[in-house]
Amino acid sequence: MNLEALYDEILSGKTAWATIPDRALWKVTGADRVRYLNGQVTNDVAALAPASAIYAAILTAKGKLLGDLWIGASEDALWIDGPASEKESLETRLRRFLAADDVEFERPVGWTLTRIFSASDLTFPREAVAFRSPRFGLRGWDLWSPDTTAVQLGLPVPEALLDSFRLEARLPQWGAELQPGDLPQEVGMDPLAISYQKGCYVGQEVVSRLHHIGHANRSLVLLAAPPLSERLPIGAPLCQDGQEAGKITSVAYSFARKAELALGIVKRASAAPGSRFQVGGSVWEVIEPLRAA
């Protein structure tokens, strides 16, 4: 099956799967786990229902990004996945404010993350944990399972198609749009990963002040190519009036638009839909996401 046919099958509701590499897993137990973790991340862990997951950021006290997290809830634990490249610093940060809290962090070894695209309820192995989430901008399940319990449901999804889904929803990815030290509102994590109604957490003062009083200096934008444009290189400069206004961070082909898409981080003044950038010999335009996450 070619990629376009597979794309259409998944959007029509067919079950499909993909292995997601480069994510580290933590299991969090103890009576204080929800209260403690809610004070560490940007999203509202207290509102999390069993068998569901939310997206969040974990920050320094100055509001700078340390990692992006997906947090899922089972009946007796919270399960966190974050970038494997940052696992040691994340482990230290997650434990930093533990005192008399009844909270235990465990890092399961030899587990694999499989993304299952399906809007239906599914049956998974007893050894696995599964959470509904909008990862990649589509409904489905994040399934963590021991490596000895392979889970492959439906059609296999190649990485190129994952990139198409992610870009169409204008979602950032660690190592591309997201880097240590970023402000989360400047790199596309607002609103999916941030709650402005929850209680206090580390870095909240900076995030709240930026939201209510100030403004982000940069923004993540989705860019559409002219017909028959060639794929842009990562890092290509985005120029306006002969001046660099940002850079390309991700590229993918969109089967919805039948053309190339790109994500870029640009100056706030240049981020409105309809803004145009010169990239090499072509002009790319800022557009709204093709679907909400």
Image (spheres, helix red, strand yellow):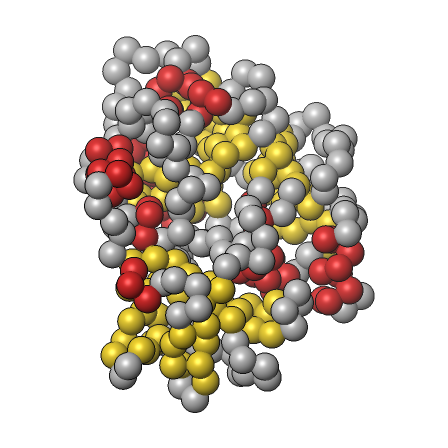
Task: Write down the quadrant of residue 269 in the picture.
Answer: bottom left
Q: Residue furthest bottom?
A: 281
**Which residue is located at x 31 percent, y 78 percent?**
240
The quadrant of the picture occupied by the N terminus is bottom right
Vertical placement of 232 versus 139: above or below?
below
Vertical placement of 276 versus 185: above or below?
below
**Which residue is located at x 69 percent, y 37 percent?**
149
**Which residue is located at x 55 percent, y 46 percent?**
293
Task: Write down the quadrant of residue 68 in the picture.
Answer: top left
Vertical placement of 232 versus 7: above or below?
below
Residue 114 appears at what percent x and percent y?
A: 63, 44
Out of 221 and 63, give the one closest to the viewer: 221
**Which residue is located at x 35 percent, y 75 percent?**
238
Residue 53 appears at what percent x and percent y?
A: 54, 32
The answer to whether residue 95 of the structure is visible from this angle is no
The answer to whether residue 45 of the structure is visible from this angle is yes
Task: Judge left or right: residue 229 versus residue 161.
Answer: left
Residue 286 appears at what percent x and percent y?
A: 45, 67
